[in-house]
Image (cartoon, grey):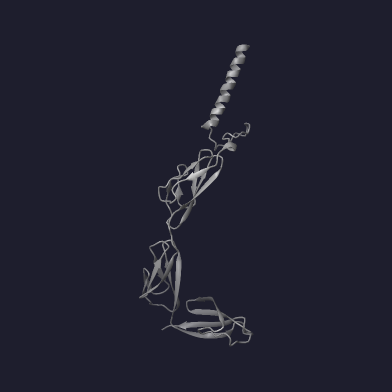
């Protein structure tokens, strides 16, 4: 009887030691605990330290981010580009963003984030520089232009053939940012001017020609050969003064 008791005690100690060893790191904390077993916390998440993630402040291809604290194993994510979920190495950095967020998640589902600089992108701007050409700065080069009529080469208009009415030059950077400039071609004529509602009396306080004396100007819409413009008269009986113009081209 004594020998049996000693053997049972030895087996019990071995099992308990095995469980303790598992707590030391042999258990995959990311796996669900068998519902048939007593529900325990194999990772001791209640004792886990705070999770952090560290790495280069400026993100480039090949940058690697490393988590610490919490409970391994760690999983990595990034808001833009591609990151190896196990090693934290980044590839495919997007040239069109200026800031990205790296996130690490541990086995206890703690999350740690790190904001990193990607590209130093200044605001995109463009303007006319003369000789039917435009210039652009900021954003991400190279730049290109699209002309609604005629032809364009780069940021220069090379032909005005077919241009009539209100045409536009759209200037883009490589990330799709756009600035649009308009120009009018042909002879414009006014086919209506007066109160927007014909039942309202006309007003002399607002004139549909420059300098638009007494008007708060609001552009309401057009296509390339037909323009409707509303002005809000100041101190008059008109709710809006409407001008409708059309164009003719040779």
**Relative to 109, residue 218 above or below:** below
Q: Quadrant of the C terminus?
A: bottom left
Please state if 88 lies on the left or on the right of 35 as rendered.
left
Q: Position of residue 224 (x, y in %)?
A: 47, 76
Q: Position of residue 99 (x, y in %)?
A: 47, 55
Q: 231 or 111: which is nearer to us?
A: 111
Residue 94 location, quadrant: bottom left
| Residue found at x 46% / y 57% | 98
**Relative to 155, residue 188 above or below:** below
Q: 36 or 131: which is nearer to us?
A: 131
Please count the marks in the image.
0
Please state if 49 lies on the left or on the right of 122 as rendered.
right
| Residue found at x 53% / y 46% | 112
Q: Position of residue 137 (x, y in %)?
A: 40, 66
Residue 2 location, quadrant: top right
**Relative to 96, residue 227 above or below:** below
| Residue found at x 50% / y 43% | 75
Q: Quadrant of the N terminus?
A: top right
Q: Position of residue 197 (x, y in %)?
A: 62, 82
């Amino acid at each position: 009887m004594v020998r049996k008791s000693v053997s049972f005690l030895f087996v019990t100690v071995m099992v308990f030691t095995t469980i303790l060893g598992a707590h030391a790191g042999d258990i995959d904390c990311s796996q669900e605990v068998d519902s048939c077993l007593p529900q325990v916390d194999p990772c001791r998440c209640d004792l886990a330290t705070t999770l952090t993630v560290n790495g280069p402040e400026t993100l480039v291809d090949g940058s690697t981010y490393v988590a610490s604290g919490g409970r391994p194993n760690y999983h990595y994510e990034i808001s833009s580009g591609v990151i190896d979920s196990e090693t934290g190495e980044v590839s495919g950095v997007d040239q069109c963003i200026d800031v990205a967020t790296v996130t690490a998640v541990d086995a206890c589902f703690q999350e740690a984030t790190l904001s990193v600089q990607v590209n130093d992108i200044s605001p995109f701007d463009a303007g006319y520089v003369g000789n039917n050409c435009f210039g652009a700065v900021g954003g991400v080069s190279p730049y290109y232009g699209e002309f609604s009529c005629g032809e364009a080469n780069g940021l220069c208009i090379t032909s005005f053939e077919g241009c009539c009415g209100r045409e536009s030059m759209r200037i883009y950077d490589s990330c799709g940012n756009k600035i649009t400039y308009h120009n009018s071609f042909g002879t414009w004529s006014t086919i209506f001017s007066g109160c927007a509602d014909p039942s309202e009396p006309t007003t002399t306080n607002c004139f549909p020609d420059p300098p638009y004396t007494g008007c708060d100007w609001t552009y309401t819409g057009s296509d390339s050969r037909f323009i409707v413009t509303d002005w809000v008269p100041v101190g008059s009986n008109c709710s809006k003064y409407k001008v409708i113009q059309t164009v003719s081209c040779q």
